[in-house]
Image: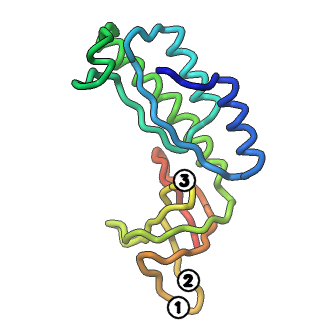
Amino acid sequence: MRRGYTKRAYLDLVGRIREEIPGVTFSSDFIVGFCGETEEEFQETLKLVEEVKYEMAFNFMYSLREKTKAHRTLVDDVPQTVKKERLRRLNEVYDRGRLEKLDAMVGNTEVVLVEKMSDKGQWTGRTDGNIRITIDGNLPNDQTIQKGDFVKVNITGRARGTPLSIATI
């Protein structure tokens, strides 16, 4: 897909960024089943996702889009069944790494931008790394929380089976 860098250069950059900015989060987009993608190439993608442990990723199966160079010049030769299986495997690896990173946040203090009240009557918001947080508790001195507030919270856990983190004020 005409990347102007190598996998090693990318991983070195990720390492340097994590060294300089502890707690930084990474996101990316991944397309599986691009024209001519081999199983070996797909395995390299899995290894990358496993190593980086993205907090957010948008994963898709490749499909030809009209009016693109690929549509005019390439053959979509990866069967749909292979694409679906690769997407399932990619999502598995991504989810495992993401949950590991979220679990590592437990015990940290984060600043959260309050977004809305949940259906269960709890405030939800996001960290500066775009991690969704449910906030339990109230501000000191009976202050109220409002949409748009920044609040300092302690990450106390992660809801079972979900990427949602739980925090207290």
- How far across and down, in percent of the image, does residue 85 sit? 38, 17
The residue that disc 3 covers is 158
Rendered image quadrant of residue 33: top left
Measured Cα–Cα span from mark 2 to mark 1: 6 Å
Position of the C terminus, as image quadrant, is bottom right
In the image, residue 94 above or below residue 72: below
Q: Residues within 10 Å of mark 1 (few under 14, many from 20)?
A: few
| Residue located at (53% from left, 42% from top) | 27
- Is 77 on the left or on the right of 135, as rendered? left
Foreground residue among 72 and 81: 72
Q: Amino acid at mark 1?
A: Asp
Q: Are marks 2 and 3 in contact (CB under 8 Å)?
A: no
User: Would you say 77 lies left or right of 126 here?
Assistant: left
Residue located beneath label 2 in the image:
139
Query: What separation in Å lies between label 1 and label 3 (alpha carbons)?
Result: 26 Å
Residue 113, position as x, y percentages in the image:
50, 69
Residue 126 vs residue 160, the one in the foreground? 126
Which residue was labeled with disc 1?
A: 142
Residue 83 picture quarter: top left
Going 69% across and 24% down the picture, which residue do you hit?
8
Label 2 Cα crowd, 10 Å radius (few <14 / some 14-19 / many 20+)? some
Residue 49 bears which disc, if any?
A: none
Q: Taking 49 as reference, is 20 left or right?
A: right
Q: In this figure, what is the number of numbered marks?
A: 3
* Residue 52 against residue 56 in the figure, above or below: above
Which structural element holds mark 2?
loop
Q: What's the distance in space between the residues labelled 2 and 3, CA to CA?
A: 21 Å
Q: Amino acid at mark 2?
A: Leu
Q: Of the residues under marks 1 and 3, which one precedes in the sequence?
A: 1
Q: Earlier in the sequence, mark 2 or mark 3?
A: 2
Q: Up-down: is 141 above or below 163? A: below
- Residues at badges 2 and 1 in contact (C-beta under 8 Å)? yes
